Image (cartoon, rainbow, N blue to C red):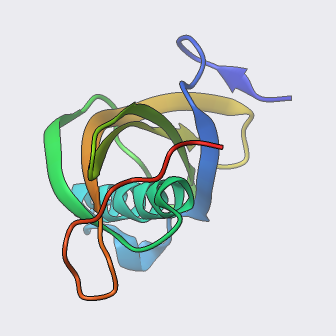
């Protein structure tokens, strides 16, 4: 059973992956860019499902790291579609670390990602109505 250190994640679990030595600096701390890349992957999955097609990242709004990730931690990315515009959508994204060989989950960072739906020619297209 997982124990959440502070509150519970917002949204749906979209991606889980293991932090490996190649993702870390010499002190064993996982690179923030690696965490951000995993968040971007998760947003791409969720937004493509919602847009029923290709999407790209247009912006990432304010991101700061509250806790470090370490080698062996499992990174859990939760996403929630917060707002849908004509061609774009804003997703709330949270990154949580399940600590190595532990049931403790701690929030590492969070951000808003703006994703844009694209047509076959790479031009913005309308996000279809939900349903």
Q: Residue farthest to the top?
A: 7
Image mark count:
0
Q: Give the vertical position of 72 relative to 81 (above or below).
A: below
Q: Is residue 89 left or right of residue 63?
A: right
Asked where in the image residue 44 lies, by quadrant, the reply is: bottom left
- Quarter of the image where the N terminus is located: top right
Is residue 18 visible from the viewing direction of this image? Answer: yes
Measuring 44% from the left and 52% from the top, which residue is drawn there?
A: 70
Q: Is residue 112 left or right of residue 81?
A: left
Q: Is residue 28 visible?
A: no
In the rendered structure, the answer to whether residue 91 lies left or right of residue 61 reads right
Q: Quadrant of the C terminus?
A: top right
Residue sitting at x 28%, y 64%:
125
Query: Which image quadrant for residue 49?
Result: bottom right
Identify the residue shown where x is 25% and y is 55%. Answer: 32
In this picture, residue 93 sits left or right of residue 11 = left
Residue 21 in percent (x, y) is at: 44, 74
The one of 109 and 24 positioned closer to us in this rendering: 109
- Pick whichever, 38 or 20, lies toward us: 38
Image location (x, y in percent) of residue 62: 13, 34
Residue placed furthest toward the bottom: 121
In the displayed structure, 12 sits above or below 128; it is above
Q: Residue at x 29, y 56 (%)?
A: 36
Q: Which residue appears farthest toward the right when viewing the image?
A: 1
């Amino acid at each position: 059973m997982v124990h959440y250190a502070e509150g519970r994640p917002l949204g749906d679990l979209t991606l889980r992956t293991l932090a490996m030595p190649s993702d870390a600096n010499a002190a064993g701390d996982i690179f923030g860019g690696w965490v951000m890349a995993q968040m971007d992957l998760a947003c791409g999955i969720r937004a493509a499902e919602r847009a029923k097609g290709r999407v790209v990242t247009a912006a990432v709004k304010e991101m700061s790291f509250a806790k470090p990730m370490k080698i062996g931690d499992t990174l859990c990315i939760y996403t929630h579609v917060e707002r849908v515009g004509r061609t774009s959508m804003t997703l709330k994204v949270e990154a949580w670390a399940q600590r190595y060989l532990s049931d403790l989950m701690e929030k590492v960072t969070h951000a808003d990602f703006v994703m844009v739906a694209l047509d076959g020619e790479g031009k913005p297209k309308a996000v279809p109505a939900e349903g």
